[in-house]
Structure formats: structure tokens, C-alpha cells
Image: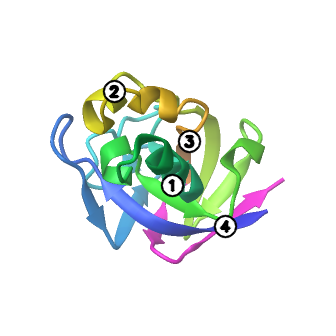
Amino acid sequence: MSGKVVKIVLRPKRKNIPIEVDFAIAIENLGLEGDHYNKPNGSRQITIIEENHLKEASEVLNVEVTPILTRRNIVVSDLSLSNIPLKAHFRLGEALLIKTGDCPPCERMNENLGLGGRIALEGKGGITAKIINGGKIKIGDEVTVDL
């Protein structure tokens, strides 16, 4: 099972507007360098969403749903994140991660996307992961799942 990294987003401060970058450095057991959500031993050190789910939500809402608006760190293509079992290891570029759970949309999606934003992403909010081994993640990197 494999896919590709198509977008990378960092959230420098909690409520500030996230920024798109060409690469990120995953720090073992912490999070992404420059992202506010880096917590030792946290289960949500990185968030990942499928590109096709952003497109589907865009069609439903008639507005472009971007990873900046969903506040997810990584967008992948050609990979069903729901098919990755809980606690399975997978690689994003040089980094090794473990899936820690789903990342359901919150009410903030209604603020960012308009009324119905949360519902449009229900079941499509992506996943959370913990960083086992750090490394560079860049656009175009392969995503591989070790099953």
C-alpha cells in the first residue's frame, strides 16, 4: 500500500493561519519542527488527510477546501488512510510514523468552511500519528505502509 505526499502545512501558533511549505522536519516523539502541536509522547503529533476527501468536501460545499482550512499537516494522494490499521507503521519520506487514530472534524470546520463544513468532512477528517523516527518529509515523497 503506497501513496504520495502532495501538500505540507505547518501551524506555527494555535489560532494563526497555517502556512504551506515544501518540506517539513519530523522530530522523533515530538512533532513537526515549527508546528505548534508538537508534544512529547502526544498521540496527535502529525495529522494527515486524503486529497480526494478535500475535493469531495469542496464539491459538497461549493468552496475550495484546502489543507490550510482543515488545519491538517500532510495531504496524501493515491492512499486510503482508513485502510491503515490502528498502530500500523508507515513512512512519510524519511520519517517513520505509527497511526494513533482518526482525526474527526471539529466545529472549527464550520468557522473555516462555512455552515456544513464539519458535516462535509465527517468520516473524512484524516488520521493522527506519532513520530517513531524523525526525518525530512517533502512534497512528492512516497508514503508506504508496513502491513
Q: Is mark 3 on a helix, strand or loop?
A: loop
| Residue in the image at 38% along x and 52% along y | 67
Whole-angstrom CA distance, mark 3 to mark 1, is 13 Å
Please name the residue that numbered disc 4 is placed on. Answer: 3
Tell me where the magenta segment starts and ends, as one range.
Answer: 133-147
* Horizontal side of residue 19 vs 1, given as left or right: left
The crowd level at tag 2 (other Cα within 10 Å; few <14, some 14-19, many 20+) is: few
Whole-angstrom CA distance, mark 2 to mark 1, is 17 Å
| Residue in the image at 60% along x and 51% along y | 97
Q: Which of marks 3 and 1 is nearer the N terminus?
A: 1
Where's residue 90, x and y in %?
Answer: 68, 56
86 vs 133, nearest the viewer: 86
Q: Report the residue that reaches farthest toward the right.
A: 147
Q: Point out the frontmost of discs 3 and 1.
A: 1
Q: Is mark 1 on a helix, strand or loop?
A: helix
Q: Which of marks 2 and 4 is nearer the N terminus?
A: 4
Please name the residue that numbered disc 1 is placed on. Answer: 55
| Residue in the image at 52% along x and 28% along y | 104
Please name the residue that numbered disc 2 is placed on. Answer: 115
* Horizontal side of residue 86 vs 71, given as left or right: right
Q: What residue type is labelled 4?
A: Gly
Q: Is mark 2 on a helix, strand or loop?
A: loop
Q: Which of marks 4 and 3 is nearer the N terminus?
A: 4
Q: Do the residues labelled 2 and 4 touch (CB within 8 Å)?
A: no
Q: Residue 31 magenta-drawn?
A: no
Q: Do the residues labelled 3 and 1 touch (CB within 8 Å)?
A: no
Whole-angstrom CA distance, mark 2 to mark 4, is 31 Å
Whole-angstrom CA distance, mark 4 to mark 1, is 17 Å
Please name the residue that numbered disc 3 is placed on. Answer: 126
* Rendering quarter of residue 77: bottom right
